[in-house]
Amino acid sequence: MASEESFVVLVHHRGSVNRKTRSGVKFTDKNPLCIVVTSTTSYDDLVSAVLMKLGLDGAKRVKKFFYRIPVTVLQNTVKYDCFTINNDEDLQSGGSNRNTNTLANPAGSSSRPAVASSSIPVYEPVVQHVASPSFAVDLNGTEGDEVVERENLPNALVGVAPVGVGDGFLVDEEDDDVEPDMIDDDSADDIGATGPALEVGGSSSGTQQYPPHFSSLDLDAMRHEGVLGHAVGFGARDVEGTTGLTEFQVGQQFQDKDEALLSVKTYSIRRGVQYKVVESDHRRYVGKCSEFGNGCTWLIRLSLRKRKGIWEVKRYNGPHTCLATSISSDHRSLDYHVISAFIMPMVRADASVSIKVLLNATAAHFGFRPTYRRVWMAKQKSIALIYGDWDESYNDLPRWVLGVQMTMPGSVVVLKTSPVRVGGQVDESQAYFHRLFWTFPPCIEAFRHCKPLVSIDGTHLYGKYGGTLLIAIAQDGNSNILPVAFALVEGENAESWTFFLSHLRQHVTPQPGLLVISDRHNGIKAALEAPDGGWLPPSAYRAFCIRHVAANFALTFKGKDARRLLVNAAYAKTEVEFDYWFDILRSEDPAMCEWANRIDYSLWTQHRDEGRRFGHMTTNISECVNSILKGVRNLPVASLVKATYGRLAELFVRKGREAEAQMGTGQQFSQHLVKCIEANMKTARCFTVTLYDRDNSEFTVAETTPTGSFSLGTYRVSLASRTCDCGYFQALHFPCQHALACCAYSRVTWTSYVHSVYQISSVFSVYRMGFTPPIPEGFWPPYDGPTVIPDPDKRRAREGRPRSTRIRTNMDEADLNRPKRCGLCRQPGHTRRSCPQVGGSSQTGHH
């Protein structure tokens, strides 16, 4: 009895998603199904075998099969014919589109034109054919395989190839510019088409595209089944796609070398193996497995196609046959270039995303945990790619100055530079960036309608170069914060604050009687107390941010309770309430009161500020940075200043529309004031009012039930002078609950006792003047001055973990009374280095 000849069938199953390309449906399966077909196999047997392999027996049906075989070999190309199988006759005769060529005799010639054909480069066989009683497949002969496609393909696609037919050949093209000739069919219904190459870590692109290789899981499964030899004309896709790792393909193309290297590195990381670079220059890149010659033959060679300017895989021996021997938590191919490509979308969405978040995301994605420093470098590279180079960004500032003044005439921008000295001589062609102040006309106009106070503070810059961003913050009558002026300086000192405050006073805040809220920095003190600065009383007054005062207090006196008592005393609106909290503080520790008494009460308490604070006790710098300027500290300087323009433009549009909508509904006051008045009216009904003059201006109000945690019982109210013993009327500049009760008693409207800043018309006036769309940079005036470069002394340390620039508060301070513990055994009295569990230097590895 003659032995039956066996063939290998690999199933390409089309999933539920029908993705179409220009040439048809795209099949990119990475887990082919191997099915043995003999000369006696019937069509129903083939259908059953396919469904059994897919686990869909009884749930799905197969409409038809496709297969292809090579029919022409011309120098460097192979031409294929595609046929359909619908029944037993087609299975034995070679398909309904072919008369003579059978599966048992695929080498026979066809008497009819092929339905379609496709061509791929010819490959040299890497291994000899190995016969098997049932089937044989060459694992290295699938590099040129393509998926044959049609516009309306059935639910399953099967490629069949006999043993020894359609072998692949490897072409070693020495001339990088020589392309293999492609033979295309002129048939109108083009079925054969090359599928797009799959991404391997990065996106591959180019004019010539190839289907995916088998994944390593597929190859291992086939090796386990004993499948050896060659089989061509197939790929795979199961129902849901059990995905393995995609291999590279000869002919796969990349836009540039960086994209190619990213794919190679990502592939190496995914496989958990290491490779070494044998050759790398502007034309070639060759990499070998670290175990090359020790059982693994993995090799890849990429070359530059000069004619097209793209990089292409010229030779590939894969996949790896070695095993990952390292158990390290890091991978040397996971450098900051690879990490940068991965975290790019996250950085683009939020430039302020923390390194810890990026590090955890990278570890979860790649399975290896890189160092903090490497992720930090990756983030800096991503920011540079998105927002521009860090160094070149400084030289973009002069042109931005010209461009923004052209876009919005009236913009105030002051750029200061310092000379560059080379060998004792001044280099006229270059200048170091020193300071920059800027504000825009809408901000200048807006401040005229805001509360008569301004908060100033500084925040550190992140990124390649250090520095400080100084911000002046105003607040409208609806409690919305609004940055009105900015400055980039080298740091917080007397000179930098004088630079900022002098321009702020001159261009933005010339109003008399202004209140400045700041921290206790000596540089601010020196700038505000300068005789010619314009910030001395009565032109302007100063107040401290209670948040900074409390933080300074906590450095000397530990404990949250004492800090809370100090803050309560500062917020007290009457002297009686202040004394109440201060006496409690004195009972805790008299030294605490002595510390507070060294600061003038008018600078940090609300009951002594004469109503200038409008109830605001902090600088609001954190709220401003987090809500309006989120992420700008992480950007290069040119992108930072551009971001302030865009963020403010968006803020003015949004807040202006809100105020305009409230005006359209007939509202007279801001929503913030309306809520406060409504809350005060609820308690105003519980008072007894007594009139003391004929002009309905002097009253006493007795509380029938105490309101709040601190109550005097009886209060004097003067509507004429807009004061109340509770302190709220004169501090907030709108009627308190006691004043509302007096208005109701006298049948007078309370609206006349509200400061004009709370009127909705004033709020709208803040945002009335909008920003204009920025003029494209190509139309900006030319700049012919010296090149502005960053000060090298401001560059961050190149080695080690970046030093934290976070402003530390009492929450970051460790308790001095708490004993230090060993990081190894957690016992007090020693450190890791002197831990007795280490037991000497010989046990360092165990430690």
Image (cartoon, rainbow, N blue to C red):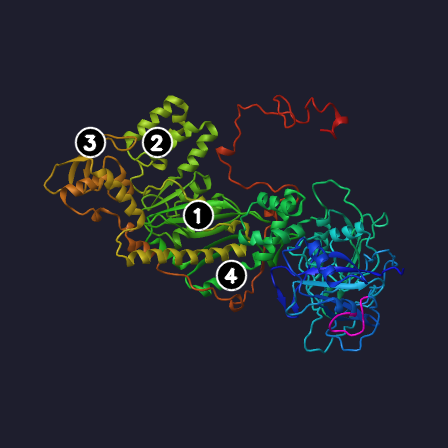
Residues at discs 1 and 2 in contact (Cβ within 8 Å) = no
**Residue linked to disc 4:** 400
Report the residue marked by disc 3.
Answer: 704
Rounded to the nearest angstrom, the CA distance separating label 1 from label 2 is 26 Å
Which sits earlier in the primary sequence, circle 4 or circle 3?
4
Q: Which amino acid type is marked by label 3?
A: Thr
Find residue 298 and report its horizontal and vertical position in percent: 80, 53
Q: Residues within 10 Å of mark 3 (few under 14, many from 20)?
A: few
Eye-nearest disc, 2 or 3: 3
- Label 1 residue SS: helix
Q: Which residue is mark 2?
A: 569
Mark 1 lies on residue: 624
- Decide if residue 470 is on the left or right side of residue 179: left
Whole-angstrom CA distance, mark 4 to mark 1, is 24 Å
Q: Residue furthest front?
A: 1
Q: Amino acid at mark 4?
A: Trp
**Image quadrant where residue 709 sits:** top left
